[in-house]
Amino acid sequence: MLAVLRSVNEEGADYLCNIPFEQWTQAYEGGLRYGHMTSNLAECINSVLKGTCHLPITSVVRETYFRLAALFPKQAASYKGQIQGGRVWCAKVLQEINKAKARPNTMHTVCHDRDNLWFRVTEFDRPHEGIIGGQYRVHLRNRTCDCERFDALRYPCAHVIAACQNLRLDPMSYVDEVYKLETMYNVWKHVFPPILDKRNWPPVSLALFKLLLDRKLCRKTKGRPYSTRIRTNIDIREITNNQKLCGWYRNRGHTSRSCPNQNS
């Protein structure tokens, strides 16, 4: 991947290489984000705050607070209802595990160490499904698999389920606690208290704040403004070696105002 980036943009590839890989790649993040990448999290936030990008910063902050205040009780009530209904795991994990349970019949599992739960899982080719077979080492005690889906997502992949079926183990015992509905409910149960009306806010002394101007954003006070247009070869006015050309005779080194031949 880095070779492709380097061939496309040398400067961009050098910039990415200076950032630790565990901060922006899923292959090196060590399963800390449970498969979520930065783009996934950004899209989730954008979906909640859709339509607020054009607002001023004060309105964006206010809209963010009130939208989260309405979203958290709604999500908490949904998870609480599922818990009261007797469910333990979230629907997404159950769906993925049920899908993976249909694949072990196309695999051959051999137990190499019953005490340490070492397995070798051989997956057969299935060209009609685009799956190329291979051998995978599964270590249930360390919760690792060579396909690395088990390591990153923290719930059993198809190879882990095949190893569990070999010893009649419950694959749900290898699902991380973060996928429990109780864990999700504990996240969403926090509330955002209502905010007082602006007229009832306590007085704040402006002496505590000091506004600093950004000189780079200020307009030029004297002289003509700088042109930011990208000039091409068809422009009449040319700039060569940082020297302006005379508007009358097209000579270098002076302008039409300081042209020595302007009287003639």
Image: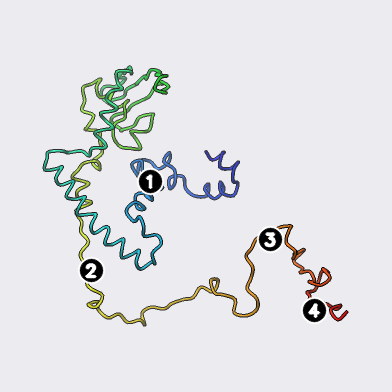
Callouts 1 and 2 close, C-beta under 8 Å: no
> Closer to us: mark 3 or mark 1?
3
Give the percent coordinates (x, y) of residue 83: 14, 43
The Cα–Cα distance between marks 1 and 2, rounded to whole angstroms, is 31 Å
Instruction: Please report whichever mark, 1 or 2, sits nearer to the chain's N-terminal start.
Output: 1
Give the percent coordinates (x, y) of residue 93: 26, 36
Callouts 2 and 3 close, C-beta under 8 Å: no
Question: Tag 3: residue type?
Answer: Arg
Residue 40, which numbered label? Answer: 1
Whether residue 86 is situated above or below residue 71 in the rendered picture:
above
- Please tell me in which quadrant of the rendered image residue 231 appears: bottom right
Name the residue that disc number 4 marks: 258
Callouts 3 and 4 close, C-beta under 8 Å: no
- Please tell me in which quadrant of the rendered image residue 215 appears: bottom right
Left or right? Give the position of 15 relative to 30: right
Residue sitting at x 58%, y 42%: 6
Residue 231, which numbered label? Answer: 3
The Cα–Cα distance between marks 4 and 1, rounded to whole angstroms, is 60 Å
The Cα–Cα distance between marks 2 and 3, rounded to whole angstroms, is 53 Å
The Cα–Cα distance between marks 3 and 1, rounded to whole angstroms, is 40 Å
Local SS, label 2: loop
Question: Tag 2: residue type?
Answer: Ile
Q: Residues within 10 Å of mark 3 (few under 14, many from 20)?
A: few
Instruction: Please report whichever mark, 3 or 4, sits nearer to the chain's N-terminal start.
Output: 3
Residue sitting at x 73%, y 58%: 234
Instruction: Please report whichever mark, 4 or 1, sits nearer to the chain's N-terminal start.
Output: 1
- Of residues 182 and 87, the one drawn nearer to the viewer in this rendering: 87
